[in-house]
Amino acid sequence: MNDPLIVTRNGPVLTVAINRPKANAIDAATSRAMGEIIAGFRDDPSLRVAILTGSGERFFCAGWDLQAAAAGEAPDSDYGVGGFGGLARLPGLAKPVIAAVNGMAVGGGFELALACDLVLAVDTAKFWLPEPRVGIVADAASLRLPKRLPRARAMELLLTGRRLDAAEAAAWGLVNQVVAQADLMAAAEALAAEIVAGAPLAIAAVLEIARATETLSIEQGHDLLEGEGLPAYQTMLRSDDAREGPRAFAEKRTPRWTGR
């Protein structure tokens, strides 16, 4: 029997590949396992970036396993820490996750990509939300898409199940890069390496600020920055790394980040 998740590590970068042929659909047990893996990534100070992808070249992830649903698994099953796929609601995740979309991202698979901080997609990838046609709702996408797209665009995808190809998804701002299938993982690893070159506390602060101020005005955001409501930001300001960066620049050398 295939391992439903293939986990590999390359230094500070963790790669998780969903491996459930034929469509990489996720049942509750797989979701719980993904949550444990992503929580472990969150809690391991030696890991900096995660890459989430799918096995094969056809599906990134087909979302909720409808075969499991037909066998009695309920939509509100226990999906484990972090919710569906381990990413939807994982508390305290202050590290970037890259979606390397190797094929079709359907329903919950599309939602997983939306839960990531950066998205790379192969040129044959497609994104769509078929939930209303099987009697359910893409709840996480209903929350995220109207924040990422103009409302009319978001509602078109949520209500109709229209398929969005990779080029269109990039034009709409949902995908960072479109690459050939053979280049996908190299592109994801190169992007991860660019992130790893930055200071870990600075990366955590960027994520914290972006998430905390998403629904605020610029003025409200500045007020939050000037207060004590952003602990990762405050830690970064007082860190050794915040002093190391300018020192390394002045000395014309690569910074030595300690995460302190």
Image (spheres, rainbow, N blue to C red):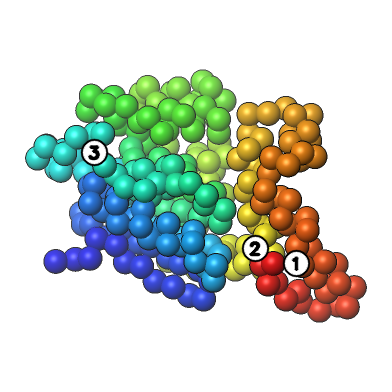
Q: Amino acid at mark 1?
A: Asp
Element on which disc 1 rests: helix
**235 with respect to 32 (left or right):** right
Q: Give the position of the N terminus as an image quadrant.
A: bottom left
State whether residue 174 is above or below residue 257.
Answer: above
Instruction: Give the crowd class for mark 3: few <14, some 14-19, many >=20 residues within 10 Å.
Output: few
Crowding near the residue tagged with mark 2, few <14, some 14–19, many ≥20 C-alpha atoms within 10 Å = many
**Label 2 sits on residue:** 200
* Contact flag, marks 2 and 1 (Cβ < 8 Å): yes
Q: Secondary structure at mark 2?
A: helix
Whole-percent x and y of residue 222? 79, 35
Quadrant of the image occupied by residue 155: top left
Quadrant that contains the C terminus: bottom right
160 on left or right of 190: left
- Which of the two discs, 2 and 1, labels the residue nearer the N terminus? 2
Residue closest to the eye, 71 or 201: 201
**Which residue ends up furthest to the right in the rendered image?**
250
The kind of residue tagged 3 is: Ser
Foreground: 244 or 107? 244
- The disc label shown at residue 241, or none: 1
Is residue 16 shown above or below 155? below
Name the residue beneath numbered marker 3. Answer: 77
Q: Earlier in the sequence, mark 2 or mark 3?
A: 3
- Badge 3 marks a residue whose secondary structure is loop
